[in-house]
Image: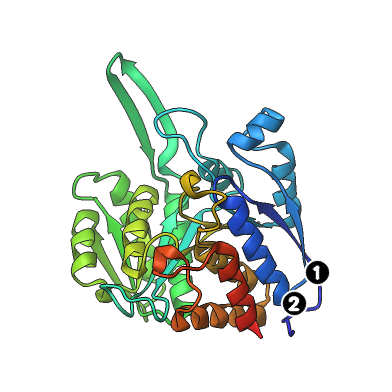
Amino acid sequence: MSTSTSREHTISLIPGDGIGPEITRVVTRILAATGVKIRWEESLAGAEAYERYKEYIPKELYLSIDRNRVALKGPVTTPIGGGFSSINVILRKHFELYANYRPIKNLPGLPTHYPAVDLIIIRENTEGEYVGIEHEVVPGVVESIKIITEKASTRISEFAFSHAQQTGRKKVHAIHKANIMKMSDGLFLRCARNVAQKYPDIIYGEHLVDNTCMQLVTNPYQYDVLLLENLYGDIISDLCAAFVGGLGLVPGANLGKECAIFEAVHGSAPDIAGKNVANPTALLQSAILMLRHIGETDAADRTHQALCKVYEERKCLTRDVGGTAGTQEFGDAIIAALG
């Protein structure tokens, strides 16, 4: 088994809850089969962490990511309308993981209504409505504050255009609602326009977020790189995932200057936890992004090729994509395809 480097990597591991631990076990087993040397530092987060430590994010998890600068994270349940705050949002803000990066691309052998989609969704990850500044003005009236800054808008625009240039992408569209939110979304647009001027070889466009949704489902092929504020990016990245089969198949990365967290973007699916039916593809795709991030490009390429081979052959797929294999059997098939 070949690998791109000979050094050992120490990486923080957050198995998550629900199906998180079982898909994490499969993915770490696949990574071990590539020959890459990884020492995992495992930490809990969320409800299970609170039961054990009385903290939703234990101090040791923060310290682990501070030390290692790279983490792989399974899905963690976020309560709706109450309970503890989103673990994802807290970690992104704490570590200044300002860029949420989601490539959207079809897997071979998996028929969808939209073949050959190849999009990059780049979402600002630290502000907008997700700052969580809310209060009750009077009983029955709640105010939620949206924060947009020049610093964050310029930073994410630079990330989008730089990535487009480095990967040979031709177009960047800034997605907004500046016809209504003239100051906040207007600032976001001004920053995107200023950055666009530095990249004359990349076509720059702007679309209203509601029109973008219609344009995407009508013709997603007109887009290349989408640059979005936090909330718009959250919604549209999920919409685009449907083009290639759903959230269970697409990767996610949260990137900052100092560290990165790679995660499955789907839910924790507690109803199927422990039944050996969950699909590890999204977490595996995220782990492939992680391998590239740490310089293990050979292992990343081989793992991606193995994943594509298993999907193309369609002999050992999980139920959600039309197969009959279990979680563990799917992992076995990937390892066998690695050779």
Q: Residues within 10 Å of mark 2 (few under 14, many from 20)?
A: some
x%, y% of residue 185?
30, 49
The answer to which image quadrant residue 328 occupies is bottom right
248 w.r.t. 271: above or below: below
Measured in 3D between alpha carbons, the distance from the residue under mark 2 to the one under mark 1, in whole angstroms, is 10 Å
Q: Disc 2 on helix, strand or loop?
A: loop
Question: Where 115 sits versus 218, above or below?
Answer: below
Q: Which residue is mark 2?
A: 35
40 and 27: which is toward the camera = 27
Residue that mark 1 sits on: 8
Could you tell whether 108 is left or right of 177 in the image?
right
Residue 154 in the image, given as x and y percentages of width and height? 44, 57
Indicate the position of residue 3 as horizontal and vertical percent values: 73, 81
**Which residue is depicted at the point 74% across and 56% down?**
68
N-term mark: 2 or 1: 1
Scheme of colours in the image: rainbow
* Tag 2 and tag 1, C-beta contact below 8 Å: no
Badge 1: residue crowd in 10 Å (few <14, some 14–19, many ≥20):
few
The answer to whether residue 245 is visible is yes
Of 152 and 279, the residue lying toward us = 279
Is residue 140 shown left or right of residue 263? left
